[in-house]
Image (cartoon, rainbow, N blue to C red):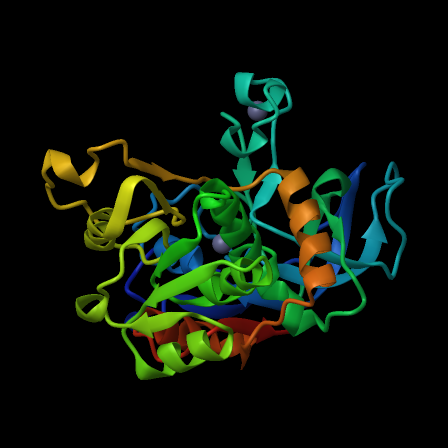
Amino acid sequence: MKAMVLERPDRIENNPLKLKQVLKPIPFEREIRVKITSCGICRTDLHIIEGELVPHKLPIIPGHQIVGYVELLGKSVTKFRVGDYVGIPWLYKTCGVCKYCKEGRENLCDNALFTGYDVDGGYAEYVVVNENFLYHLPQTYKDIEIAPLLCGGTIGYYAFKSVDSEVNNKIGFFGFGSSAHITLQIARHIGKEVYVVARKERDFELAYELGATWAGKLEALNSQLDSAIVFAPSGEMIVSALEHIRKGGKVVSAGIFATPLPSFDYFHIYPEKTLTSIANVTRDIVKEFLEIANSMKIKTQVTEYELSQANLALSNIKHSKVSGSSVIKI
Ligand SMILES: [Zn+2]
Ligand SMILES: [Zn+2]
């Protein structure tokens, strides 16, 4: 099969992903082979490819917002049939026995494996996954439209749940990419005011189109917020978000990676301000979000690429040349 393979982390401008012919993976026991039709691109892919995240497996096929059809079943599979419309997110497998799995917080599993990081992912024609970590997708969405919901959407939803409360009505979004443009629709659906900090005019326009109360550059933000989600992988943005929330407010960083936080004085967290991050999502959150997205009719604005254009797609994300989500059509 064809796949975009990373042999060695490098700057995306050097085109580190190479189009190769590799062996089709074989499903064993409870595994399923999925014929991929599209794979959403996540900023995490860029952190893996450029080596900001320590490599777990090389060579690796990145990609963890995978949409396709069940093509081949391992002999013990019971939950899926050939032809089912399915999705595969970031959380590829958990151990089920560690402290976190037992507490119902499998997103923090000590032995978790991640798609496109520990095991080969979706920048390819086929992928294999355990049936317990595969999801039925609603037919109401086209493959390229639903792919960005599988990570960007679910992680944004999880971050939003973390700041959502009756006393938090003015929510700041710091950074406005794939995840944020989906999360904005959830926040608006339940009547929250959203203040979007971004860099490009194009992003302000999309934010207003989706119902933002305000969108603009950081220097122009002069509203006090109840809480904030930081989508940008930037320690400086996290500190800026703390500066803009009220007493008792909360800042959640939604990324898997951020640049170092500049030192900040105590009044950034006093009185009673909270700073936290979120990491991965449980299977229950993925299922809950997919249902909510379908019922809220959440839409994604998608830029489509061919498999061989994965380096270009990632470079465009890195350099803020596109708004909304980017998806590889296989
Ligand atoms: Zn575990
Ligand atoms: Zn992701």
Q: In the rendered view, would you say 72 is above or below 145?
A: above
Residue drawn at point x = 27 percent, y = 73 percent: 199
Judge by depth and name the residue closer to the eye, 294 or 142: 294
For the image, the number of numbered tags is: 0
Q: Give left or right: position of 156 versus 236.
A: right
Residue drawn at point x = 23 percent, y = 66 percent: 221
Judge by depth and name the residue closer to the eye, 279 or 316: 279
Rendered location of residue 185, percent (x, y)? 55, 65
Rendered location of residue 246, percent (x, y)? 27, 45
Please identify the quadrant where the N terminus is shown: bottom right
Image quarter for residue 95?
top right
Quarter of the rendered structure image containing ligand 1: top right
Q: In the rendered view, would you say 37 is above or below 42?
A: below
Image quarter for residue 14?
bottom left
Residue drawn at point x = 43 percent, y = 58 percent: 45
Image quarter for residue 313?
bottom left
Query: In this view of the protein, can residue 151 be seen by the observer?
Result: yes
Please identify the quadrant where the C terminus is shown: bottom right
Residue drawn at point x = 41 percent, y = 60 percent: 43
Rendered location of residue 119, percent (x, y)? 55, 45
Q: Give left or right: position of 122 versus 18.
A: right
Rendered location of residue 146, percent (x, y)? 66, 66
